[in-house]
Image: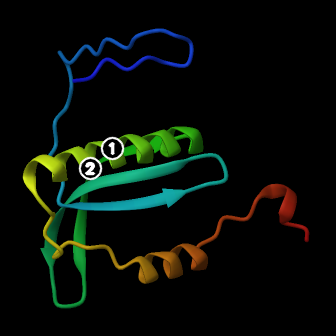
Amino acid sequence: MTKPKLSSGQTVIWNEEKQAVYYSNLMGISMTPFDLSILFGQIGNASETEIQGLVLAKVMLSPEQVQNLIKLLSIALAKYVEGNGQLRSGGALNEEAFVKEIEGNKVVRVEDAGK
């Protein structure tokens, strides 16, 4: 585990004694005007048309922390690929479907509601 420095100059020392560890093969994203959330889960019962997602954890982040997470994951993934080779393409995201879903579920800000 890395020991990152915060913008305050402090070093983060992680205490992992009581951490929960979950394996996730399913995830989702939700958002409000104030935060973004990542749902981590596992695939439950499934039919030809639906999959039941069993939520294990929901992590809520400020937009600034999401931006930091994206940067950190990008660096970590590049290092992973460098050491382990290219990823399988089978689990690739359908970006077009994701964008369409988000656009259909936009949250209206209070100050914009009367416009």
- Position of residue 32 relative to residue 48, above or below, is above
Marks 2 and 1, how far apart at CA: 5 Å
Instruction: Residue 16 in the image: state x and y as whole percent.
Output: 20, 18
Instruction: Residue 22 in the image: state x and y as whole percent.
Output: 16, 43
- Which residue corresponds to the image point at 49% horizontal and 18% vertical from the top-left? 6
What's the amino acid at mark 2?
Ala
Question: Which residue is at the front of the view, 103 or 54?
Answer: 103
Residue hosting label 2:
78
Question: Which residue is at the front of the view, 4 or 17?
Answer: 4
Q: Is mark 2 on a helix, strand or loop?
A: helix
- Position of residue 52 relative to residue 18, above or below, is below
Q: Do the residues labelled 2 and 1 touch (CB within 8 Å)?
A: yes
Which quadrant would the C terminus be assigned to in this image?
Answer: bottom right
Label 2 environment density (alpha carbons within 10 Å; few <14, some 14–19, many ≥20): some
Q: Residue furthest front?
A: 82
Residue hosting label 1:
75
